Image (cartoon, rainbow, N blue to C red):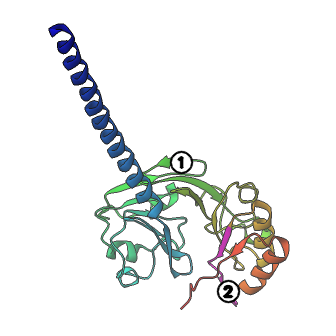
Amino acid sequence: MKYLNLLLIVTCFSVFSCKTDSKESNNQTSEADNSELVAENSDKEKVLDIHPISHATMVLSYGDIDIYVDPTGGAKAFASFSKPDFVLITDIHGDHLNLETLKALDLSNATIIGPKTVMGKLPEDLKAKVLMTINNGDSATLNGFDVEAIPMYNLREEALQFHTKGRGNGYVLTIGNERIYISGDTEDIAEMRALENIDKAFVCMNLPWTMTVDKAAEAVLEFKPKAVYPYHYRGKDGMSDVSKFKTLINQGDEDIDVVQLDWYN
């Protein structure tokens, strides 16, 4: 009888212990699931904010990362932004590489990225955190995004002297789950037309330095980004017809969203 009572006590204790262990295990699993959910939600809450400054100059913000693209306009043009984490420069011309603006900005946390020709023109006393040279075809994984250097150059005989192949960079950035193309100064080159899976594309169109509205539209309709942002559209004889560009895109593929931002306020 005593043996039966002892067996009953041991059995009950074991059952209770198992239930307790199970409860603790479930709590740990729940905490892990919640942690993963918070991380996932945090990532989903990040969105890419696009801030046009002027012509080819913009700020791309993603979470706490600020990327300055071809900064011009002096420090006052960026007074409402945090100091840059990254600076992308496409070419040596003054509307892309502006040394006065670079010297005026706080670059203490910034990685400056550009082709060899650009990096060779930066002053030795420029107080940037990192200088990174990437040329056409190069790529790099950085803190928060990936960057790939894409060719940008002229095709028309009369414009070949403006942008020679290999001198400047366009860029494809992978930020979050999106691929963003920044054309730099280019015509409708084969490398642009061959792009794939582009979510947002910034495409230039101004004469005599880059390409016509019609050629820009032809190229966009070939590589089919989800959204296209006409930029860098002030030419020698005034502004290019971005309304015509939108019409051409909408007629060719109504699924491509044409976003017209104010680059020349």
Task: Using the image, determine if residue 31 lies above or below residue 217.
Answer: above
x 35%, y 62%: residue:
110
Task: Using the image, determine if residue 204 lies above or below residue 23.
Answer: below
Q: Residues within 10 Å of mark 2 (few under 14, many from 20)?
A: few
Q: Which mark is residue 241?
A: none
Q: Is residue 7 left or right of residue 52?
A: left
The N terminus lies in which quarter of the figure? top left
Magenta segment: does it hold 92?
Answer: no
Q: CA distance from mark 1 to mark 2?
A: 33 Å
Along the line of sight, which residue is nearer the eye, 66 or 205?
66
- Does dot 1 land on a helix, a strand or a loop? strand
Q: Which mark is residue 139?
A: 1
Residue numbers of the magenta segment: 227-241
x 80%, y 77%: residue:
250
Residue 27 in percent (x, y) is at 31, 42
Residue occupied by mark 2 = 236
Q: Quadrant of residue 76?
A: bottom left
